[in-house]
Amino acid sequence: MVSHLTQGQRALLESALIRRQHELDRQLVEHQGGLSRAEHAREVLSQDSDDVSHREAERELDMAINDRDLGELGSVSAALRRLKEGPFGLCADCGDEIAFDRLKVEPWALRCVSCEALRERAARA
Ligand SMILES: [Zn+2]
């Protein structure tokens, strides 16, 4: 399957994906400070504080951020794999080519704009 993307466009998307992957990796490591999630939680809870609920909330936020980063990291890695093994840049739903303008913003996009819009509408319904 020949991609509609030029060599230059693919190279550009690949470097964007790798950059994002490194960013996310760093964020996750910084966030956890090398500790597992459970250890991290215990450590936060054992710190003396007269504002327990505030710390609880911070901990929740930490985890939400981690989950989001982990999810995005998965999408980024999957996109890199597709870029190497193909097909890349084809909509998972309708098989149409995903516009390069869209991939520039979101290189890990799985669907074309119209299918993405359809899904969002379906999710809200
Ligand atoms: Zn589509």
Image: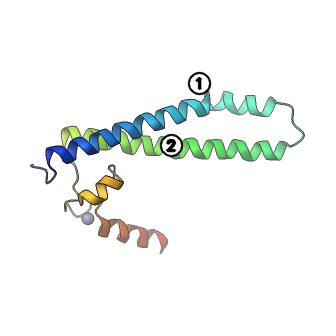
Q: Which residue is mark 1?
A: 34
Percent position (x, y) of residue 86?
A: 19, 44
Q: Secondary structure at mark 2?
A: helix
Q: Is residue 115 left or right of residue 1?
A: right
Percent position (x, y) of residue 87?
A: 18, 47
Colour scheme in use = rainbow
Q: Residue furthest top?
A: 34
Name which residue lies at 52% across and 47% down: 68
Q: In the image, what residue type sits under mark 1?
A: Gly
Q: Earlier in the sequence, mark 1 or mark 2?
A: 1
Percent position (x, y) of residue 24?
A: 47, 38
In this rendering, the answer to whether 122 lies above or below 1 is: below
* CA–CA distance in space, label 1 to label 2: 15 Å
- Displayed quadrant of residue 116: bottom left
Q: Residues within 10 Å of mark 1 (few under 14, many from 20)?
A: few
Name which residue lies at 42% across and 71% down: 122
Q: Which mark is residue 69?
A: 2
Percent position (x, y) of residue 67?
A: 54, 44
Judge whether residue 92 can be spotted in this image.
no
Q: Is residue 1 left or right of residue 42?
A: left
Q: Residues within 10 Å of mark 2 (few under 14, many from 20)?
A: some
Q: Quadrant of ligand 1?
A: bottom left
Q: Secondary structure at mark 1?
A: loop
